[in-house]
Image (spheres, rainbow, N blue to C red):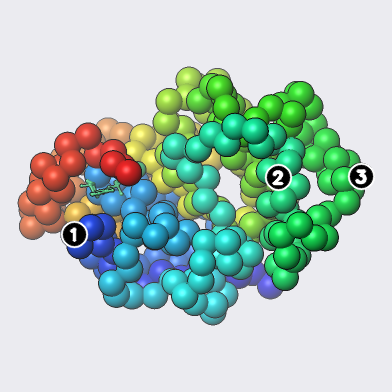
Amino acid sequence: MSKVLKISNLHVAIDGKEILKGVDLTLRQGEVHALMGPNGSGKSTLSYALMGHPNYEVTEGTATLDGVDLLGLEADERAKAGLFLAFQYPTSIPGVTVANFLRHAVSNVRKPDRKEGEDLISMRDFRKELRAEMDELGMDQEFARRYLNEGFSGGEKKRAEVLQLAMLRPAFAILDETDSGLDIDAVRIVSEGVNKVAEKASTGVLVITHYQRILNYIKPQFVHILFGGRIVESGGPEIVQLLEREGYDWVRAKYPDLAKVEDELEQHNPAGQLTF
Ligand code: ADP
Ligand code: MG
């Protein structure tokens, strides 16, 4: 049965300031959705709030995965429920190898009641599976012995996220600006990996991006524009072409009140970057 991720009237605040002002979005497994929007429109805020980052306070609304209330769960419980977030800025964990990290992550997700220090999936089975997934993604086996994200290039960090996706096989994956900082070859390689994995596991994918580039490779059936803390437009791939041709000016013109909100946010944090 295909699962459903349903976000209704989601309001999210950071440091008491409301960033998302009522987001509605429904994804089904196997679907690919793109969420586009200018820098600072709240795209990462949505992904962090869904994954349960403690700095992002949900003040109103609901998010459910197959009827399960995600907002009442800790981040690890959300992962066990079938949600995965590929970070815009993945963190390095010196001293923890990719393989060791993945063995724990996979054990936790597949054996939700496991206690730390017990019942890891067997090294033999894990190695076999990891090798197969890495082969399929065209990754060098040596990569698994490196410390997670430590000294990785931008492309390698994103490939490590795709490898996690391949091993964890979540029902839903949110990819936050997976193309940022990558050259075009890396975008293609990472996208091909995502497509392969998503198809195999029938993953529902939410690709977050403000450029159309990655959407040439991961093709969305549904496209949404986030602006001023709300989804203002939803449609098909034609929206991507429209944004590519005309930028966001027509969105500003069509939603002048929300454009004011955007300008305020921009002044609040001109770089449009996370500040923690
Ligand atoms: P996007 O991912 O669409 O570029 P973000 O979700 O990162 O946007 O940010 C939305 C807005 O939230 C930003 O313009 C900024 O003003 C604000 N914001 C984001 N993170 C923080 C933070 N840690 N503290 C204060 N304001 C923040
Ligand atoms: Mg962002």
Q: Nearer the viewer, residue 120 or 42?
A: 120
Q: Are marks 1 and 3 in contact (CB under 8 Å)?
A: no
What residue do we see at 24% from left, 39% from top?
272
**Residue 182: horizontal and vertical position, in percent?**
47, 24
Q: Which residue is mark 1?
A: 17
Quarter assignment of residue 269: top left
Name the quadrant containing residue 3: bottom right
Lower position in the chain sequence, tag 1 or tag 2: 1
Report helix, strand or loop for mark 1.
strand
Q: Which residue is mark 2?
A: 102
Q: Say left or right for 133 vs 254.
A: right
> Sequence-wise, which precedes: disc 2 or disc 3?
2
Q: Quadrant of the C terminus?
A: top left
Q: Amino acid at mark 1?
A: Lys
Rendered location of residue 238, percent (x, y):
37, 45
* Residue type (three-letter) at the residue carrying disc 2: Leu
Q: Earlier in the sequence, mark 1 or mark 3?
A: 1
Left or right side of 223 for 253: left
Whether residues under marks 1 and 2 lie with C-beta atoms below 8 angstroms apart, the answer is no
Disc 3 packing (10 Å; few <14; some 14–19; many ≥20): few
Residues packed near mark 2 inside 10 Å, few (<14), some (14 to 19) or many (20 plus): many
Instruction: Report the amino acid beneath label 3.
Output: Arg
Say whether residue 61 is visible: yes
Q: CA distance from mark 1 to mark 3?
A: 49 Å
Q: Position of residue 99 (x, y in %)?
A: 74, 38
Q: Residue at x 55, y 65 (%)?
A: 78
Residue 225 tag number: none
Please determine whether, in this image, residue 18 is positioned above or below residue 161: below
Residue behind mark 3: 124
Q: Circle 1: is it few (<14), some (14-19), or many (20+) Cα within 10 Å? A: few
Instruction: State the image coordinates of residue 215 (x, y, percent, origin top left).
Output: 46, 38
